[in-house]
Image: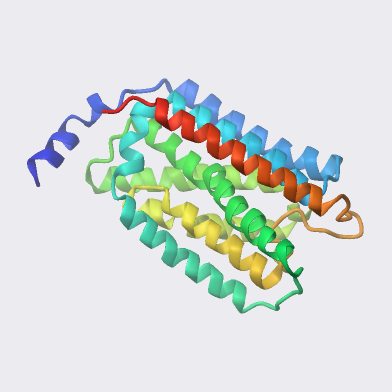
Amino acid sequence: MPVQLHSVVTHLDDVVPGRPKRSLLLWFGGASLLFFLVPLIGTDWLGLHPDLYYLGYFTLAVAFFTAFVATHASALRILWTQHLWQSLVIGALAGAMLAIGVANQAATPHPEGWRYGFQIAWRGFVYGSVDALTLYVFPAAVAYLLMRGNRRGFGRKAGFAGLALVLSLLVTTTYHLGYSEYRDQTLRYPEIGAVVANVPTALTGNPLGAVVTHATMHVSSVVHQNEGGAQHMIPPKVTADYPNHGSSDLAAGLAGAWLLATAGALTVLVRRQPVH
């Protein structure tokens, strides 16, 4: 292998400092609890307008993920950069497969004009991306740190892929149980989606392709089925028991402000990171 790559592999345990397993398990347990309570409180108990609920969920999820990554920044650098483009390409292919599955289901009406564009961006791209960070990228990062970044050889690569998938399925399950519509056999749908979204991680070792996979699925669901169809791909599901109350104009305005504030905060955070 090239000298530079050989050096990285040989000294991987030095480059990726070990993290106490108890600390990582606390992070993971905290995420599982937090992302169960967020939909439970926001949709089941408070019945918030979906877009206002997303506003709260996105804020908590991005803040949690940013805090986790900042805490383990140096240890995770290789995870984000190694085989990045391969992961993104495989993620796009997996997302296209899911989009075809959505297109083969019955279509549902959608709003017109700017509200339709807003839903594609907010409920499609942003929701899908945040979900992917929470349900797939974060568990893979925990798995990587638990293994101290050591994925040398087929056995450890397979072990990382398996551990990342198990942790992803655990978070996916607890998160979706927070929504009332998934407390039956419907829970199998997001779990199947989690298996597909973990394909980029399994094949390349880089989990960022899952963002492309899940965002593609969400966008296709908004375009073709609007509310997520029979498989409830975009919870919460609006029913007689969960009215779509509240002002969509207010939700859109708050969403726009959220996007600007989040983009500005992340830009400042990235610029403050030391250059190596």
Q: In this view, does 20 lie to the left or right of 220?
A: left
- Residue at the location (85% across, 40% down)? 45
Q: Is residue 210 left or right of residue 75?
A: right
Residue 178, given in percent of the width and then of the height, sits at: 73, 44
Q: Give the quadrant of the C terminus.
A: top left
Q: In this view, does 149 lie to the left or right of 10?
A: right
Identify the image quadrant of residue 228. Answer: bottom right
- Residue at the location (80% across, 52% down)? 249
Viewer-nearest residue: 117 or 196? 117
Viewer-nearest residue: 200 or 47? 47
Q: Can residue 38 be seen in this view?
A: yes
- Residue at the location (61% across, 43% down)? 259
Residue 135, given in percent of the width and then of the height, sits at: 55, 45
Identify the image quadrant of residue 62. Answer: top right
Residue 166's place in the image compared with 106, above or below, is above
Identify the image quadrant of residue 115. Answer: bottom right
